[in-house]
Amino acid sequence: MSRNIKLQIEYDGSKYCGWQIQSRKAKGVKHKSIQGTIEKALRRVLQEKVWLIGSGRTDAGVHALAQTANFQTDSKISLGKLRHALNGVLPGDIVISEAKEAKPDFHSRFQAKSKIYRYSILNRRYPSALLCGKVYFYSFPLDLKLMQKEAKALLGKHDFKAFCASASCAKDAIRTIKHIKLSRKSDLIALEIEANGFLYNMARNIAGTLIEIGRGKMPAGSMKKILASRSRKLCGPTAPAHGLCLVKVKY
């Protein structure tokens, strides 16, 4: 009988085109994906063709602390041996942190209830060698209290079309932000957002807009007006991908 195995995956997305396998016909993009790299490793370990289903896409350069994926297999391999074998053949920037038996009908994408993303900003006068590629270095002072106040306008169910990349926004841009928090520890500012779903570039556009507000380039009340406008032109720039990390997928 076929088994349905659920994986929890940690990865550094710096060298990849994102989670999803990309068409090789696309020009000017990296074709190496997280999904494709893990599928290749699975086929090597299990000696059978398998297809990996992820909880959702992460863009090129975005990281994950706990991405979730599942696949079907006829193999009898133990979960401990599977995890060990996969980590032995995967590159060092992709790690399987957990492997579990899932119910036969479990689907990583369709059964996800919410996702938590964290955007990290290093806010000081000089960059960091050790955090390079994991945080967005921003050297100008930021008004954290104003950013926190403005972020509250995003809580709840709204049309988030203004925060979606205009060229590829879904027809239905209604999403619910369940939790949003901005905190600072020393020189690091963390923006944490939990929502029932994210539009393309939504988290990064929210981060970019809050940075503009914190810098004083947008007045108090801007976030509420941008949200109501449904216009991408009014919000801030898209924050760089390397500051974003998928922290958790809830089921």
Image: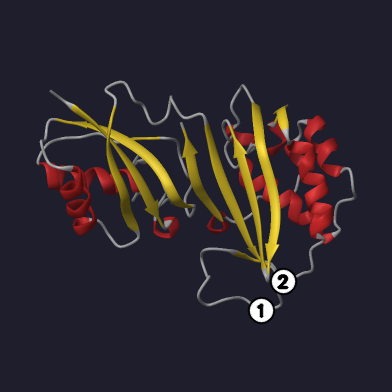
Residue annotated with mark 2: 139
Residue drawn where x is 16% and y is 35% of the image: 49
Question: Mark 2–mark 1 contact, CB under 8 Å?
Answer: yes
Residue annotated with mark 1: 126
Task: Residue type at mark 1: give it.
Answer: Tyr
212 left or right of 100?
right
Residue drawn where x is 84% and y is 53% of the image: 146
Q: Tell me the colour scheme of the image.
A: secondary structure
- Residue 36 quadrant: top left
Q: Can residue 32 be seen?
A: yes
Q: Which mark is residue 37?
A: none
Label 1 secondary element: loop
Give the crowd class for mark 1: few <14, some 14-19, many >=20 residues within 10 Å.
Answer: few
In the rendered image, residue 128, in percent from the top left (x then y), is placed at: 57, 76
Residue drawn where x is 19% and y is 48% of the image: 80
In the rendered image, residue 8, in percent from the top left (x then y), is placed at: 35, 44
Label 2 secondary element: loop
Is the residue 232 above or below the residue 123 in the image? above
